[in-house]
Amino acid sequence: NGNCIADSDTVIINIYDQPTANAGLDEDLCNVYATSFTGAALLGTSQGIWSNHPSNAAGVIFADNTSPISGVSGLIEGGYQFIWTLTNGSCTPVNDTVVINVYDPPVSDAGLDQQLCNTYTTILTGNNPVGTSTGMWSEDATSANPSVVVFGDATAFNSSISSLIEGTYSLVWTVSNGTCTPVTDTVLLDVYD
């Protein structure tokens, strides 16, 4: 402007890509109480943070809650949801959730063998499965039982059993829990007329 000294100013324009959150694959763990996330790598200037879903059990520890592949420990049996939230400048934050199910190893105890005299029904005394474990009674396929039995509730540890006749029965109590290998125990019933 005429004889005036020229003046200038600088404006900075930051351009951000909208982030896309990928928390990785869900996991099922048996007798394992720590793992690492498999979230996608951060792109550009995006920043991420892991957080606990409010329904998660207390005591969870993140090795680095800003890493998409952070370790997580302090898990106990149950289901967990972890939220991976990404921000990038003025873009709207986005998130994705990963589910981790943790299972304790199952335990099976079919109870004490029984001897029945002139009694053709009884109550089984297997262990009550704990946590998320479930049980199932069945006849031992490797044994020739004298008759086909009737379970009152084959999923109950203390199921009644009927339709017994004289002879020896071999019954199997199978306890399962998530992705853990099921375990079995056998009880013998000796029935006498």
Image (tube, rainbow, N blue to C red):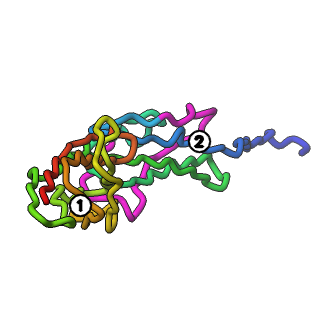
Residue 14 can be seen in this image: no
Front-most of 39 and 193?
Answer: 193
Secondary structure beneath disc 2? loop
* 103 in the magenta segment: no
Q: Earlier in the sequence, mark 1 or mark 2?
A: 2
Front-most of 27 and 134?
Answer: 134
Which secondary structure is most common in the magenta stretch? loop
Residue at image mark 1 = 157
Q: Quadrant of the N terminus?
A: top right
Percent coordinates x, y for residue 35 in the rendering: 35, 36
Q: Which amino acid does the dot numbered 2 rest on?
A: Asn
Q: Please tell me which residue is depicted at 44% across the width and 54% down the height of the picture.
A: 81
Q: Is residue 64 left or right of residue 158?
A: right
Can you say whether 48 is above or below 135 in the image? above
Can you say whether 158 is above or below 190 in the image? below
**Which mark, residue 22?**
2
Q: Is residue 41 left or right of residue 11?
A: left
Mark 2 surroundings within 10 Å by alpha-carbon count, few (fewer than 14), some (14 through 19), many (20 or more) = many
- Farthest residue to the right: give it: 2
Front-most of 76 and 138?
Answer: 138
Mark 1 surroundings within 10 Å by alpha-carbon count, few (fewer than 14), some (14 through 19), many (20 or more) = many
Q: Quadrant of the C terminus?
A: bottom left
Percent coordinates x, y for residue 86 in the rendering: 56, 47
Q: CA distance from mark 1 to mark 2?
A: 42 Å
Residue 189 can be seen in this image: yes
* 51 in the magenta segment: yes
Can you say whether 184 is above or below 53 in the image? above
Front-most of 35 and 79?
Answer: 79
